[in-house]
Amino acid sequence: MSTFPLITVLTCIPLVGAVVLIGLDFERKQLARGLALGFNLVSLLGAVLLWLHFDSASPNLQLTERHDWIPSLGAEYFVGVDGLGLLMVLLTAIVVPIAMLASWRIEEKVPLYFSMFLLLQAGLFGTFTALNFFHWFIFWELSLVPAFFLIKLWGGPRRSAAATQFFIYTMVGSVAMLLSFLAIFWAVGTFDFHTLAEMGSSGKLAGALADKLGWINLTGHQLALVIFAGVFLGFAVKVPLIPFHTWLPVAYAEAPTGVTMVLTGLMSKMGVYGFLRILLPIFPNEMRLIMTPLLWLAVATIVLSACAAFAQRDLKRMFAYSSINHLGYCLLGVFVLARFTGNDGPLNVEKTAVLNGVLLQMFNHGLTAPILFCFIGFLEQRSGGLRGLDDFGGLRKVAPIFCGLMGIAIFASLGLPGLNGFIGEFLIFKGSFPLATWATALSVLGLLVTAIFLLTVLQRVFSGPLNVKWSALAELTWPERFIVIPATALMLLIGIWPQVLMGKINLTVIQMVDHLKF
């Protein structure tokens, strides 16, 4: 257990910032922007210290803090990180300041806007480090409230409908998950994720449910399946998994650019993180029982969302569906991990490859997708709000740096070798093929359609004859380059040297796979 509460301090930094900014007068715009960025840079420094203090030679939870909170409710303040949590904390610390810089031109209620941003960041930090459901659920919900107001107050023309749909979908999922965990607590008396994971894998959880609940003559395994469905719904909506995705395109399209960046880069990862940290370890037997339907949902998420993206003419909606497509690869990897392999060494090696790929894909998509939305935001600012696929053409002739850097992000999203998007997708497909051949083969269709619509964007927006309407389109300014170049450099670094991330997560991955052997 660490002596210095680094995780607590890291989580409190944006909370303190949010309180400071909420007290500012709305006219103190520059001060609000500067303070928000300052608190973010301190958070980034804290995440870097967390990264440096993390021992990659140990698979165990590190930098843990554990204190009694409400013993009668089984609530503890229990935080810590392994490779999975570390990766998500670092991603949060990187993406949020980039999204804030992309929001620099916001003029309405600036202190409130950035206060909501910091509150959202605190919720993300807490979600990725909490290890007791009571504590974790508070931060899970804490991220929902500021996201709702950021869309509702600063979004586009349809912002009210988008915010309401986002709130209702995610709240229904959260309520279902809360009810499921209340039933679990009633049966076993604990909210601790690791204790529940041990009980779930050994079958003790199903037995406890049968003994304590005994609902309408269902067996313990049937009760576990019902409770699994409630938790599954909460995470499926958040990712989102088709058919629970319909809130996402309109929310992404109507949200301000910076908010869309956080939604796609970080909040969608909360769902995948929940699958890996909570659902899969606690309910491995239930996931194995319905593995085939789950794989069909993953294939549908990959293929149908790619086809939907290809059908769009609004760039923001196109990349919203593309985001669903890329997260579908993560879900494919998560679901094949549930396959029973016992002591089959070769298949367990493939599971290790899959899980490494899922974690890398989470980080890489969390970096690449926000930058793509950032570029679309720059394009909207220059075009007076236009973002249609057919509104442009030949832009590389007047803005070659803009088109070059956005082209790198598009090719990273496409999974071009040498860029960060390649290695995660490769490991997922490489490991999934022997574990679920038919699902992996069908999912390749999603890669094909993704390539078609991304190359169509390059052709329609950047290539061809220049529309004279855009002959004076401004090149990226130096502040705008400052926003996107560090992320572009990371795409190149991870694409060439993925071990910079894999070295930190590999032992965590091996330990998680060992838990799933039986």
Image (tube, rainbow, N blue to C red):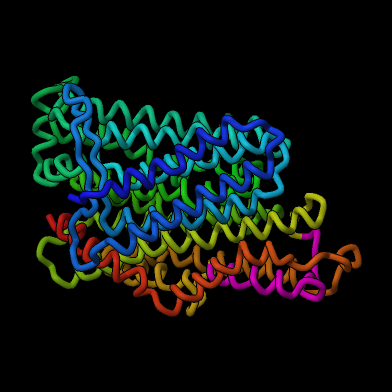
Horizontal arrangement in the rendering, residue 14 relative to residue 480 (left or right): left
Dominant SS of magenta comes to: helix
Query: Is residue 400 within the magenta segment?
Result: yes
The part of the image, by quadrant, that contains residue 203 is top left
Locate the C terminus and report the quarter of the image it occupies. Answer: bottom left
Q: Position of residue 430 (x, y in %)?
A: 33, 72
Q: Position of residue 321 (x, y in %)?
A: 57, 52
Looking at the image, residue 233 lies above or below residue 3: above
Q: Position of residue 95 (x, y in %)?
A: 51, 55
Q: Which residues are magenta?
A: 390-412
Looking at the image, residue 307 lies above or below residue 25: below
The part of the image, by quadrant, that contains residue 153 is top right
Horizontal arrangement in the rendering, residue 341 relative to residue 379 (left or right): left
Which of these two is toward me, 275 or 95? 95
Please say whether residue 453 is visible from this viewpoint: no
Q: Position of residue 200 (x, y in %)?
A: 15, 42
Looking at the image, residue 278 lies above or below residue 428: above
Which of these two is toward me, 293 or 202? 202
Q: How many marks?
A: 0
Which of these two is toward me, 480 or 451? 480
